[in-house]
Image (cartoon, helix red, strand yellow):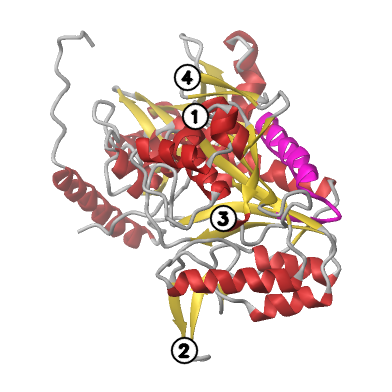
Amino acid sequence: MSHDTQPPVPPDDNQLIAERREKLAGMRTQAKAAGTAVFPNDFKPEHRAAALHEAYDSLANEALEPQAVKVSVAGRMMLKRVMGKACFATVQDATGRIQFYITQDAVGPEVLAAFKQWDLGDILACEGTLFKTKTGELSVKATSIRMLTKSLRPLPSDFYGMADQEQKYRQRYVDLITDEKARNRFAARSKALSSIRQFMVANQFMEVETPMLHPIPGGANARPFVTHHNALDQEMFLRIAPELYLKRLIVGGFERVFEINRSFRNEGISVRHNPEFTMMEFYAAFWNHHDLMDFTEGVLRHAAEQATGSARVTYAGKEVHLDLPFARLSVRDSLVAHAGLTEAEADSAEAVHAKLKSLGEEPPKHWGLSALQFGLFEAAVEEKLWQPTFIIDYPVEVSPLARASDANPAITERFELFITGREYANGFSELNDAEDQAARFQSQVANKDAGDEEAMFYDADFIRALEYGMPPTGGCGIGIDRLMMLLTDSPSIRDVILFPALRREG
């Protein structure tokens, strides 16, 4: 098509749907008269497009056609060329596409006439033999062909596709039919998740399942979704994190556990946030935050290699080096490296406060030096961390579940992993002092009473579990959706979630 040729105006969808419904009505009448099914369920394809291409693409037709290789294939018709006594159809199955060649001599005039009335999107079953066309395209010379499913809605046209991004999210089923990149993206997600599971099990972690309905929300500072259980007549909360249940299992004697879980947070929606999301949390007895950082590097590196073939990936046009050792930088030192503070200023509450004010931030009056440093890190540093960087030494005030440092009680043995300016993981040496944990819960309750909707509840049963004794433990959560954004070079979290949260239509 020349550049100055205008694409045709697509017919009205309602008209096309009406025409297809008329065809289906005719098919119902014919099927009733013949005693057959309109939507038959008796065909089982023995071959897949990708496997056929892999096995036979290298052969010339002179070598292939005499073999009379018999195949049976099914898939959705994506392209169609109608001629006199011969027609071509390109059909797509889960693995790829292959062409059917339908002739009157091979299938009979009635079947050929019926095929000419079939539409793009219809799902077809074909049996025949393989050959190559004059242009060298592997094809199935049909000896029989029939329709398994009538498509009542037209697929997006070549010209108009699914250009509307929100429509792609709302109608993911159409997006997957028409966009090979979308199919590959979710296949890569599946491969990465499988590889993570294998990696965890190979390192002696046991996969477990914990509740999604909680009597008390816990494990993170977040606003929960609230529901009501009728039989128990009590308020329940959708899980915001599995942390407190997984640590109960460490108390119970399982020394390494992990869960790839769906969690829910009743918060804003953005290119980085979906209210329903997937993360992996894992806990290991007798590990500290340094062990966790080493292991987290290994998890991400392994997932990248399995999903993409390399631990060096490209995101938004820039390389990300998952193959190299990840940097480690304290919150305080990051201000010197990335926020323009001197060593002396980084240790001055007044200087950090002034820097925050200059950025338009208004820090709470009760913040001490550690909290001010963390606030400036979030405001000025986080977005600059493109290559994998562990930020460590978080203040106690923002880490209610982490163990305080023995050397400096104002900070915790906690890290967060940042890549491409985003948080990917959060981990720490767990707090196993029941009395300290109870005091921190009480502090969180005070914050909640003061209006902080994301502050934690007091979980008496978790305190009771800690009172039985939890060994020294390290725990970490990895955001699976954000990891998949990185591995598939996707700009939005909605691109890597099959069915993201959207405002209801209409």
Indicate which disc residue 339 carries: 1
Q: Is residue 188 left or right of residue 18?
A: right
From this viewpoint, is residue 47 visible?
A: no
* Lower position in the chain sequence, tag 2 or tag 1: 2
Indicate which disc residue 60 carries: none
Q: Secondary structure at mark 4?
A: loop
* Lower position in the chain sequence, tag 4 or tag 3: 4
The label nearer to you, 4 versus 1, is 1
Residue type at the position of mark 3: Val
The label nearer to you, 4 versus 3, is 3
Query: How far apart are labels 2 and 1 at the CA level?
Result: 52 Å
Whether residue 286 appears in magenta in the rendering, the answer is yes
As rendered, which of 6 and 408 lies closer to the eye? Answer: 408
Q: Secondary structure at mark 2?
A: loop
Which residue position holds label 3? 398
Q: Quadrant of residue 261?
A: bottom right
* Lower position in the chain sequence, tag 3 or tag 2: 2
Q: Residue at x 81, y 54 (%)?
A: 205
If the image is split into quadrants, where does the N terminus sit?
Answer: top left
Indicate which disc residue 230 carries: 2
Magenta highlight range: 282-305
* Lower position in the chain sequence, tag 4 or tag 2: 2
Whether residue 402 appears in magenta in the rendering, the answer is no
